[in-house]
Each structure stands twice: as C-alpha cells, then as structure tokens.
Amino acid sequence: MRIMGLDVGSKTVGVAVSDALGWTAQGVETVPINEDREQFGLDRLGELIDTYEVTKVVIGLPKHMNGDVGVRGEASQHYGRLIEERFQLPVEYWDERLTTMAAERTLLEADVSRKKRKKVIDKVAASMILQGFLDRHTQGG
C-alpha cells in the first residue's frame, strides 16, 4: 500500500510516494500542468499511480494563516475531485501552510543553486506534505 503526496500549483504538481510500509516519503517528480488550459497532467499521474501501486492520494491544502481556505486551496480541492473521479482513489487533504517555505529553506541550507531549487522545490514540498501525513498516522494520531 503506497500513498502518493501532491503539492498542487497552477503550473506544476510536485509528486512524492511513500515506501511500501507507509513510513517514509520520497520525491518522485514534478509534473507540468496548465490550469488556465485545464491541462492537469492526469495521464502522467495515472502512470505514476500504476507504477507505484498507489492506493491513496494526499494533497496539500494551502490555507491562510487564519485557517480559511482561499483560491489556491479551492484549486487543490478541485484537483482532488478530478483524481477521485478519474482514478477511483480516496483523497485526503493535509494542511500545508508554510510547507513550500520550509522546502525552500531546506534546499538553501543544502546549498542547492537557485536554478536547481526551482526544478525540485515542488517535489520536495510534496515529500514534506506526505511525510507530515505519514508521521501523524504512524503515531496513531
């Protein structure tokens, strides 16, 4: 049973998957999308779901600091509904406030160049979203 974590943006979706035991998250890739043209990368996502034998998807839900769900959060929920409909998989949401900033800080501390950071930031954020979800659920919470 592998779980897929997604960091949904307007131009890319960062993808991470868990190990078979559901303990650790590993960034896989960044899938290009175009919200404006309703190109959501679902074909590629489906290939990854099949390859990794994914049984559940966790999507980062960006919220405002006061807890409200804004435009980006609504876009993530829409993406989740597309996944549920197309792949018949359960989708859960994980509060991702500050995840992208934490991913950026991690990459800066690792001295990753700006050009490389731009290429990997979304899959690092997806890994952090998924790892947070896995940690919460393996601790029984």
Image (spheres, helix red, strand yellow):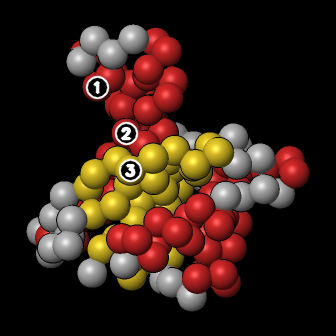
| Mark carried by residue 28 | 3
Coordinates of residue 13 in the picture (x, y in percent): 57, 49
Up/down of 7 relative to 116, above or below? below
The secondary structure type at the circle numbered 2 is helix
Q: Image check: 124 left or right of 97? A: left
Q: Are marks 2 and 1 in contact (CB under 8 Å)?
A: yes
Up/down of 47 relative to 96, above or below? below
Disc 1: CA contacts within 10 A as few (<14), some (14-19) or many (>=20): some
Assign the N terminus to one quadrant of the image.
Answer: bottom left
Disc 2: CA contacts within 10 A as few (<14), some (14-19) or many (>=20): many
Direction bottom: furthest residue: 88
Who is closer to the viewer here, 99 or 127?
Answer: 127
Residue that numbered label 2 is attached to: 124
Alpha carbons under labels 3 and 2: distance apart: 9 Å
The residue at the point 52 percent across, 44 percent down is 30
Direction right: furthest residue: 37
Name the amino acid, label 1: Thr
Coordinates of residue 66 in the picture (x, y in percent): 53, 45
Residue that numbered label 1 is attached to: 106
Residue 97 in sight in this render: no
Alpha carbons under labels 1 and 3: distance apart: 17 Å
Who is closer to the viewer here, 83 or 67?
Answer: 83
Name the amino acid, label 3: Val
Whichever of callouts 3 and 2 sits on the residue coming sooner in the sequence is 3
Coordinates of residue 123 in the picture (x, y in percent): 43, 43
Mark 3 or mark 2, which is nearer to you?
A: 3
Direction left: furthest residue: 139
Q: Are marks 3 and 2 in contact (CB under 8 Å)?
A: no
Q: Image check: 101 left or right of 66? A: left
